[in-house]
Amino acid sequence: MRYRRATAGGGTYFFTVNLADRSSRLLIDRVDDLRASVRLVKQRHPFDIVAWVALPDHLHTIWTLPISDNDFSTRWALIKAGFSRCIEHVEDIGPSRRAKGERGIWQRRFWEHQIRDEEDLGRHIDYVHFNPVKHGYTVRASEWLYSSIHRYIRLEDLPVDWAAPPSDSVKDVGERSE
């Protein structure tokens, strides 16, 4: 079966990539291996990371590809393979995967959405950064270590308390805690 994918060279894309075992914590337990795999692929097949968040069992990212390039599938295959090579062979592998020589770490496919305009991009960046809060891993997006939100805060594109609940906001200097 052939899957329809967006094919615009130089496009900006939102991705969701999942582990096969959705109860796993592998992506944050081995985040350094994930980062190393991404770095290596970026060196050989350049792309810009607009936003990124790694959660225990899945990740979301937004990439912009070079002008004449639309091959994000190869990049994902290389990232997944590079990460998988770092992981001990302890996962269950079904007969179909075994017959194809595949590991059982990642779901085979990923979901992508081609970003249409600045408004669409903004919504997806917010989605990426808010995802740890949505899943209950943290109360404030800035508390999640495995997110590009820290770059946005450092560049002053977002405040440190972005999307924090009102009760979680920092007290004025003049207020005293009881």
Image (cartoon, rainbow, N blue to C red):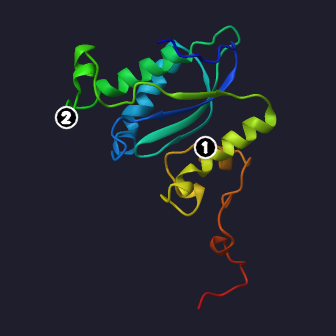
Residue 10's quadrant in the figure?
A: top right
Q: Residues within 10 Å of mark 1 (few under 14, many from 20)?
A: many
Q: Which residue is mark 1?
A: 128
Nearer the observer, 124 or 51: 124
Residue 23 horizontal/vertical position (percent) = 34, 47
Residue furthest bottom as drawn: 178
Label 1's element?
Answer: helix
Nearer the observer, 153 or 96: 96
Amino acid beneath label 2: Val
Residue 172 horizontal/vertical position (percent) = 72, 78
Asked if 62 appears above or below 55 in the picture, the reply is above
Left or right position of 26 against 141: left
The numbered dot on residue 163 is none
Label 2's element?
Answer: loop
User: Which residue is at a point 59% across and 27% down the rendered structure image?
Assistant: 112
Q: Which residue is mark 2?
A: 90
User: Which residue is at a point 32% across and 31% down the rendered structure image?
Assistant: 105
Left or right position of 27 against 48: left
* Mark 2 / mark 1, whichever is N-terminal: 2
Asked if 83 appears above or below 176 in the picture, the reply is above
Residue furthest left as drawn: 90
The quarter of the image holding the C terminus is: bottom right
Residue 62 horizontal/vertical position (percent) = 62, 32
Asked if 42 appears above or below 175 in the picture, the reply is above
Amino acid beneath label 1: Val
Residue 145 horizontal/vertical position (percent) = 49, 50
Residue 128's quadrant in the figure?
A: top right
Q: Residues within 10 Å of mark 2 (few under 14, many from 20)?
A: few
Residue furthest front as drawn: 1
Nearer the observer, 168 or 3: 3
- Mark 2 to mark 1: distance in Å? 30 Å
Left or right position of 71 against 21: right
